[in-house]
C-alpha cells in the first residue's frame, strides 16, 4: 500500500514538473509571437477602422486544442470537491485562447487589420460527460487587405 501511495505521489510530482516546464515554454513562445504581431490590429468591431482603399477581405481562423495534464486534473478535482477558484484551468484556457488568436493572425498573412473577431470554446470530454480531456478554442474573424 505504501508503494501505491508513493507511486501516486511520484506521478503527481512528475506531472507538476513536466506540466510547469511545458507551460512556461508555451507562454514564452506566445509572448514572442504576440510581439511580432502587435502591429496587426484585431478588433470585435463589425466595420474596418478605415473603410477607404479596401482591396479585399476574407474569413480567417485559428484553432487550438490543448489537453489537461494529470496534475491539473487532480488539483481541479480537489478544488471542485472543497469548492473554490480553479486557477489551474484558467491558465489552460488563457494559453489556448492566446494561441488561437495567434494562429488566426498567422492565417491572415499580409492583412492590414482583422475585424469582427469571435472566439468559441468547447470542452472535449473523455469517456464520461463529467471528465474533461481537452479544451478547444476557435478564433475567427474577417481579414481586411489594402
Image (tube, rainbow, N blue to C red):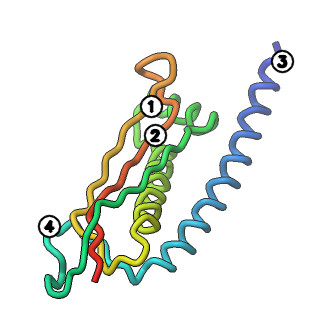
| Residue drawn at x 40%, y 62% as measured from the top left | 104
Q: Is residue 140 above or below residue 29?
A: above
The quarter of the picture where the N terminus appears is top right
| Residue 22 in the image, given as x and y percentages of width and height | 67, 53
Q: Which residue is mark 3?
A: 2
Query: Along the horizontal axis of the image, is 130 left or right of 119?
Result: right
Labelled pair 2, 1 in contact (Cβ < 8 Å): yes
Front-lying residue, 70 or 125: 125
State how far apart marks 4 and 3 are (Cα): 61 Å
Label 4 secondary element: loop
Q: Is residue 52 above or below residue 137?
A: below
Upstream in sequence: badge 2 or badge 1: 1
Q: Nearer the viewer, mark 4 or mark 2?
A: 4
Q: Which residue is mark 1?
A: 124
| Residue 127 in the image, given as x and y percentages of width and height | 50, 17
State how far apart marks 2 and 3 are (Cα): 35 Å
Front-lying residue, 18 or 124: 124
Q: Which residue is mark 4?
A: 46
State how far apart marks 2 and 1 are (Cα): 6 Å
| Residue drawn at x 41%, y 68% as measured from the top left | 105
Upstream in sequence: badge 4 or badge 1: 4
Q: Which residue is mark 2?
A: 135
Residue 44 disc label: none
Label 2 secondary element: strand
Upstream in sequence: badge 4 or badge 2: 4
State how far apart marks 3 and 1 are (Cα): 35 Å
Amino acid at each position: 500500500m505504501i508503494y501505491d501511495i508513493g507511486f501516486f505521489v511520484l506521478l503527481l510530482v512528475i506531472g507538476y514538473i513536466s506540466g510547469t516546464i511545458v507551460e512556461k515554454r508555451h507562454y514564452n513562445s506566445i509572448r514572442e509571437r504576440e510581439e511580432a504581431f502587435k502591429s496587426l490590429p484585431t478588433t470585435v468591431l463589425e466595420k474596418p477602422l478605415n473603410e477607404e482603399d479596401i482591396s479585399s477581405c476574407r474569413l480567417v481562423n485559428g484553432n487550438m486544442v490543448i489537453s489537461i495534464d494529470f496534475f491539473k486534473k487532480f488539483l481541479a478535482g480537489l478544488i471542485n470537491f472543497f469548492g473554490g477558484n480553479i486557477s489551474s484551468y484558467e491558465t489552460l484556457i488563457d494559453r489556448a485562447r492566446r494561441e488561437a488568436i495567434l494562429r488566426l493572425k498567422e492565417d491572415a498573412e499580409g492583412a492590414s487589420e482583422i475585424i469582427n473577431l469571435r472566439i468559441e470554446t468547447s470542452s472535449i470530454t473523455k469517456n464520461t460527460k463529467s471528465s474533461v480531456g481537452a479544451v478547444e478554442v476557435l478564433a475567427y474573424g474577417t481579414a481586411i487587405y489594402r
